[in-house]
Amino acid sequence: MSRMVFCKKFQQELPGLAVPPLPGELGQEIYQSISEKAWQEWQANQTMLINEHRLSLMDRDARAFLTQEMERFFANEDYARPEGYVPPDPS
């Protein structure tokens, strides 16, 4: 059975991540309050942002940008999206 968390993004109990996705305090916070579904959605958005903005994860400013956008994404605030991206119709 999956570990359940109250997901900050979706505001409901959902299956959580198996392990913290990042080292340190931020990884623990995500592990405790973000569902696997929300993490997967963030990873898809993050990949599009990295590709569109041609970000290098070796660059400290790029990592700071992604961390800031990740926090906005999970808090349901306005976050960066790839220009012109239209999500697929779920139906």
Image (spheres, rainbow, N blue to C red):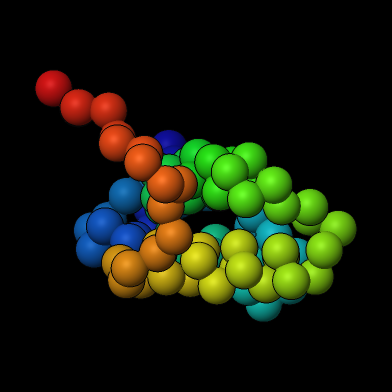
Q: Quadrant of the N terminus?
A: top left
The correct choice, above or below, for 85 with respect to 74 in the image is above
Residue at the top extreme, as displayed: 91
Q: Is residue 51 above or below residue 53?
A: above
- Kindly give the residue lying farthest to the bottom in the view shown: 25
Residue displayed at 36% across by 39% down: 85
- Give the quadrant of the C terminus: top left
Residue at 55% across, 73% down? 68
**In the rendering, at what x and y percent does residue 33 appear?**
43, 66
Q: Position of residue 20 (x, y in %)?
A: 64, 57
Q: Which residue lies at the image location 42% right of the left edge and 47% below the top edge?
A: 83
Between 53 and 50, the one lying in front of the other is 53
Q: Residue furthest right?
A: 58
| Residue 19 seen in the current view | no
Taking the spot 54% from the left edge, 41% from the top edge, the residue there is 48
Query: From this viewpoint, is residue 31 visible?
Result: yes
**x and y, in percent, of residue 6 in the image:** 32, 63
Residue at the far front: name it. Answer: 84
* Left or right: residue 28 compared with residue 32: right
Q: Quadrant of residue 25?
A: bottom right
Task: Describe residue 91's horizontal placement relative to residue 46 as left or right.
Answer: left
Residue in the foreground of this view, choosing between 67 and 1: 67
25 versus 13 height, above or below? below
Vertical arrangement, residue 33 with respect to residue 84, above or below: below
Q: Quadrant of residue 34?
A: bottom left
- Between 77 and 32, which is closer to the camera in this rendering? 77
